[in-house]
Every structure is written in structure tokens, then in C-alpha cells.
Image (spheres, helix red, strand yellow):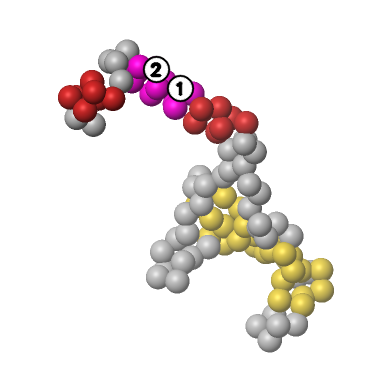
Amino acid sequence: MNASLRQRLAPARVWPLAMLLALGLIALAVVLCPAAPVPGAVGNPLLYANGEAVSDGRWSVLCIDGVAYLEIDSPRGQAVVPKFRSNGRVARCALPAGE
């Protein structure tokens, strides 16, 4: 913001206080607001390509070192494979705060 405009709008000592107040409110909101859970990332039913459910089959999304992995659990075994995007690159992920 232009210095002359700032001087016209408020005294010079008000701006640093306003900035500190804004930063404090943002920090308080980050601390007090719970992180939204990732919907549908754990315990989803595993389906065959034709849409039929695999008995006792589940899949979940894992986040390991910022990379998304699919954990597949079926009666035949368990596998953890990287999740790929439609362009062929590995999908990235981020854990919600507090986990």
C-alpha cells in the first residue's frame, strides 16, 4: 500500500498493530479449527472390474513421505502400491494437521 495513502487513512503506529492482530487471528484459527477428515480414504469396499464386491476386500489410501499409496486387502493377500494420476505421475498427498 502506498505510504502517503497509509498516512491519510491511519496513524503510522496503527498499521503494525493491525498486521499483528490479523496474523494472530490466522494463527488462532489454524490452532483451534480441527482438520477435516479425508472422506473415503479408509476401509472402502474392494470391487471387481464388473462392479461386483470382493468378499472381505477393502482398500485404503496411505500417505507416506508425501506420496499417496493404495493399501489393498483381499482374501488372497495384501498389497501396497503407489497411486498414479491420470497423466502417469505418482500422486502426492498431505496429511491433515495433527496426524
Question: Residue 29: horizontal and vertical position, in percent?
Answer: 56, 32
Callout 1: helix, strand or loop?
A: helix
Instruction: Give me the C-alpha separation between circle 2 and circle 1.
Output: 6 Å
**Residue type, mark 2 in image:** Leu
- Per the image, the residue denoted by label 2 is 17
Decide whether the magenta segment is chiefly helix, strand or loop: helix
Does residue 12 show up magenta in the picture? no
Q: Position of residue 71 (x, y in %)?
A: 65, 59
**Among the 4 quarters of the image, the one containing residue 54:** bottom right
- Numbered range of the magenta stretch: 14-24
Q: Residues within 10 Å of mark 1 (few under 14, many from 20)?
A: few
Tell me the quarter of the image containing the C terminus.
Answer: top right
77 up-or-down from 53: above or below = above
Residue at left offset 40%, top offset 22%: 18
Residue 99 seen in this snapshot: no
Q: Residue 13's quadrant in the figure? A: top left
Q: How far from the left and from the top, in percent, is residue 42?
A: 70, 57
Which numbered circle lies on residue 21? 1
> From this viewpoint, is residue 94 visible?
yes
Residue at x 70% of width, y 83% of height = 51
Q: Secondary structure at mark 2?
A: helix
Quadrant the N terminus occupies: top left
For badge 1, the amino acid type reads Leu
Relative to residue 97, is residue 85 drawn left or right?
left
Magenta-span inclusion, residue 15: yes
Can you say whether 16 is above or below 74 in the image?
A: above
- Crowding at dot 2, Cα within 10 Å, few <14 / some 14-19 / many 20+, comes out as few
Judge from the rendering whether residue 43 lies leftward or rightward of residue 33; answer left or right: right
